[in-house]
Image (spheres, helix red, strand yellow):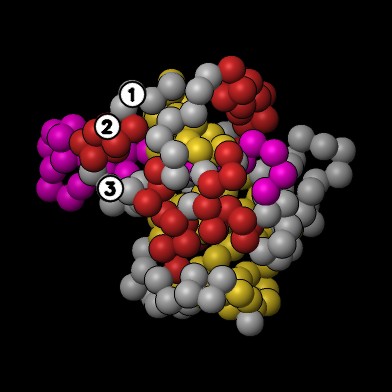
């Protein structure tokens, strides 16, 4: 279901112009909806996540997401899906802010390249993230970047292409990624209870290297 839906989004990305160059300097979890609207204008369209969808099973919030076609250096382009949640004690749309992001690169892009292109993702690690190899019950492997600082509430999750006969695993920051998520740590953990995890390294946005 996820592959068919995103195909339509990616096709439209090839036909429509991209939005603000290198915009993710302003786009991150916690960015107010008003700031996003001022920086990028109207989204190209909605993206719906329903209960039971693959994205929801990862921990992505259900409901409407807004789609932007955002450009990075060297003309790389990412389809970026933004979810707005209500801030605590807020009651109006003017108080909404980004609470989750999904990104699908157009073309071949590694986890490390995406982190370099998308400051909103790299900043989630603050100083250092644990690099965790995650294996689900089917044996497919994905990569989780989990802040070592327990107070950081966002995790980064990277998956390969699931629309092929053999799942394309993501096992390091040099692996090609098809889906990248910045999600609530608690929501992600709630949906990943049945997986095996192995900490394989640490990654720092300051050095851009694994250790």
Return the x and y of residue 62 as percentages of the image width and height: 43, 35
Q: Position of residue 20 (x, y in %)?
A: 40, 35
Please report whichever mark, 3 or 1, sits nearer to the chain's N-terminal start: 3
User: Are there few (<14), some (14-19), or many (20+) residues within 10 Å of tag 1?
Assistant: few
- Rendering coords of residue 179 (x, y %): 61, 44
**In this orientation, does residue 125 appear?**
yes
The CA span between labels 3 and 2 is 10 Å
Please identify the quadrant where the C terminus is shown: bottom right
Name which residue lies at 13% across and 43% down.
Answer: 90
Element under label 2?
A: helix
Residue 189 sits above or below residue 14 on the image: below
Name the quadrant containing residue 43: top left
Q: Which residue is under mark 3? A: 31
Q: Secondary structure at mark 3?
A: loop
Compared to residue 41, the image places residue 95 above or below, namely below
| Drawn side of residue 31 relative to residue 67, left or right | left
Q: Which mark is residue 42?
A: 1
Q: Using residue 120 as the reference point, say whether residue 158 is left or right of it.
A: right
* Residue that sits furthest to the right in the current view: 165
- Which of the two discs, 3 and 2, labels the residue nearer the N terminus? 3
User: What's the CA distance linking mark 3 and mark 1?
Assistant: 16 Å
- Give the crowd class for mark 2: few <14, some 14-19, many >=20 residues within 10 Å: few
Badge 3 crowding class, 10 Å Cα cut-off, few under 14, some 14 to 19, many 20 or more, is some
What percent of the width, then of the height, locates residue 77? Answer: 57, 37
Residue range corresponding to the magenta coloring: 83-109
- Label 1 near label 2: C-beta < 8 Å? yes
Residue at image mark 2: 37
Q: Does label 2 or label 1 sit earlier along the sequence?
A: 2
Would you say residue 9 is visible in this rendering?
no
Closest to the observer, 78 or 65? 78
**Residue at the spot x=33%, y=23% of the render?**
42
Instruction: Estimate the spatial distance between the alpha carbons at disc 2 and disc 1, rounded to whole Å.
Output: 6 Å
């Amino acid at each position: 279901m996820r592959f068919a839906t995103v195909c339509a989004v990616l096709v439209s990305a090839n036909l429509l112009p991209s939005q603000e160059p290198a915009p993710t300097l302003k786009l991150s979890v916690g960015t107010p909806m008003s700031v996003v609207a001022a920086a990028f204008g109207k989204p190209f369209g909605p993206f719906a996540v329903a209960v039971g969808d693959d994205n929801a099973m990862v921990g992505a919030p259900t409901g409407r997401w807004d789609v932007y076609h955002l450009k990075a250096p060297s003309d790389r382009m990412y389809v970026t899906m933004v979810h707005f949640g209500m801030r605590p004690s807020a009651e109006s749309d003017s108080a909404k802010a980004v609470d989750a992001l999904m990104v699908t690169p157009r073309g071949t892009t590694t986890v490390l390249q995406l982190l370099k292109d998308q400051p909103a993702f790299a900043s989630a690690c603050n100083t250092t993230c644990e690099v965790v190899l995650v294996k689900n019950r089917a044996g497919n492997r994905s990569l989780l970047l989990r802040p070592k600082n327990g107070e950081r509430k966002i995790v980064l999750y990277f998956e390969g292409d699931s629309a092929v006969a053999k799942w394309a695993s993501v096992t390091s920051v040099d692996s090609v990624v098809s889906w990248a998520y910045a999600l609530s740590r608690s929501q992600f953990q709630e949906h990943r209870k049945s997986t095996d995890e192995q900490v394989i390294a640490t990654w720092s946005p300051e050095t851009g290297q694994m250790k």
